[in-house]
Amino acid sequence: MIKGRIHLDEKYVKVKKEHAYDLNAIDNKTKYILAHLFVKKRTPKKCIDFLRQIKQTCYKQILLRRQINKRIIFVSDKFGPYKIAFNKLFYYVAKLNFGVSIACKNHGLKHNNNP
């Protein structure tokens, strides 16, 4: 059951001299991993595949929250393909906080280029 916001983030990893990304979606209250995808390139198609995992497992819960007018909030940094994928799959049933990176928001910064 989704209890909080869904945070979308990626990690840069190096496996056997190959560069890759680990995409994760985590419920911020329960710390449950809702989706996970390991990719070589962060393209819009890969992000759609990644968010489609959430849609397959949690869409009924998202629709229930939409019906009681308490939309699930997705939080992401300024990575454009997340916004493209979100708008394609969840535009009418959830809300996206898109912009300043999550680490910057935690420190109260409004822009990534603050000293």
Image (tube, grey):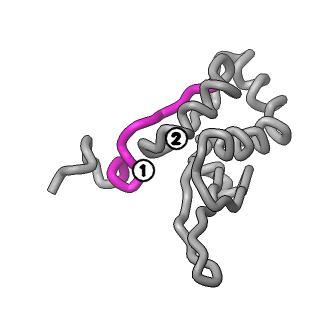
Would residue 1 be seen by someone viewing this image from the given angle?
Answer: no
Labelled pair 1, 2 in contact (Cβ < 8 Å): yes
Q: Residues within 10 Å of mark 1 (few under 14, many from 20)?
A: some
Badge 1 marks a residue whose secondary structure is helix
Name the spot of residue 36 as percent of width and height, x first.
72, 56
Question: Which residue occupies the extreme bottom position in the image?
Answer: 16
Residue 17 horizontal side relative to residue 109, left or right: right
Name the spot of residue 29 as percent of width and height, x first.
62, 51
Give amino acid for label 2. Val
Give amino acid for label 1. Ile
Q: Which residue is mark 2?
A: 75
Q: Which of the 4 image quarters holds residue 19?
A: bottom right
Q: Does 14 appear above or below 113?
A: below
Range of residues picked out in magenta: 94-106
Name the spot of residue 49 as percent of width and height, x first.
74, 43
**Magenta region includes residue 101:** yes
Q: Does 16 appear above or below 86?
A: below
| 100 or 43: nearer the viewer | 43
Q: Which residue is mark 1?
A: 102
